[in-house]
Image (cartoon, rainbow, N blue to C red):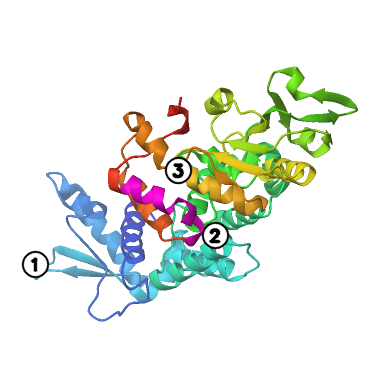
Amino acid sequence: MDEFQLGVLGALIKSYNGSVISKGGSLRNLKIRLGLKDKALATYNGRDAFKYIDSNDEKLSELQKLGYIIVHRNNAGSLEWVELNISAVDDIIKACGFDNKNAHLKNIITLLSVGGNIGFVELFAQSEREYASTKYDWHKSYYKDEDELAVVLKALNAMASQTDEIMERDFSVKVLGDSKAFSRISKKLVQIAKKFDDQLVVEDEDDDKIVLLNYNIVKNSTYALIKGKLNFKLNDQSIELEKLKFEYALNDAMIKNIEFMPSEFSKLITVENLTSFYKLEEEDSLIVYLAGFHNHTKQLLLEKLYKAFSPKVCLHFGDIDVGGFMIFNNLVQSTGISFLPYHMGIEELEIYKDKAKPLTANDVSRLQKLRRNPEFSIFEVVIEYMLAHNLKLEQEALD
């Protein structure tokens, strides 16, 4: 089969794949055809068409004899259009080595029906299975074919069950057996997570790193900065933080191995923003910067501190926006500690209104959803004020 014949058959199959017929629709009166204006039959047009017409007619005749197409001509014998023989689609795909969309769909639906997925991954699988079954297609922005779908499902389930902090390359090797495999599909994974995981906590929806932090996957090891009245040991070395007079950085291994010594502080304050952490000074307090998002290991630090010292007050200082509210809620839910908002109210919005920013359309939509969610009732009045006055405030704007 030559280039012209493959071009004609390829164009017909492509049209077929996009038609209602391939999607299980009615065959009645629906034809898949190419006219003289279609690219595959372009050599029938133009000044030099006479050079190709006889040869092309012979090649089309061969395809018609094979039962692949039906050639339509006018009374003068000139070509009008070429029609696909629907019943020969499978034979054409096999003979020409074309991509078999129906076979892909069957394999995709089978993969999505296996089950055993964790949390939001099953929601994704259910949604995709319904889409593939009813639309006879799949979302190629999520996966290009069944082979990539298998990898995507494997990676998503591993993400959903990853409880300890892990470097991205190490996660990739552990789950996919290749240090670069995860990075090749990470944008697709993040896209799926943002759509289907309603537990996701993000400030900046465009920041993939923040999304992956929700699943304890990091580019580089993260730290919790602490300052204030805390005494502890690491590898039998005693550290009295107040005497040190500097903040102290704890990585994940240090947090897991920290031993607390008697300390006196009544307030535990967590801070979302680094600039605010450095500016904040509170007596009788231990102040913890959690590098924006508090993943599993940082939660362990807070749980250890709460269990060891039972501070009278636990406060969280974050942005007065959707991301800040979601981070606060996730902090409370994940640690089980009854944190209270710190400088995250109407008073701050009024005092610093000149430094506030207007709400985007997305902000308004998300705030309206939070307002209706009982988990965010602690911010109900603040949200009403934000919507009424069209503003939000980043914590570093506070003096």
Task: Return the x and y of residue 183 as percentages of the image width and height.
Answer: 58, 40
- Mark 1 or 3, closer to the camera: 3
Residue 36 at x, y percent in the picture: 17, 57
Viewer-proximal residue among 141 and 346: 346
Q: For the residues carrying marks 2 and 3, which lies nearer the camera in this image?
A: 3
User: In the displayed structure, would residue 294 be above or below residue 124?
Assistant: above
On the image, the x and y values in percent for residue 76 come to 8, 67
Disc 3 is placed on an element classified as loop
Query: Residue drawn at (68%, 40%), measured in percent from left and top?
Result: 298
Mark 3: amino acid: Glu
| Residue type marked 2 | Glu
Q: Which residue is mark 3?
A: 205
Nearer mark to the viewer, of 1 and 2 = 2
For image coordinates 75% across by 24% down, the residue present is: 241
Q: Residues within 10 Å of mark 3 (few under 14, many from 20)?
A: some
Specify start and end residues of the magenta stretch as a single range.
Answer: 374-387
Pointer 2 residue = 146
Q: Earlier in the sequence, mark 1 or mark 3?
A: 1
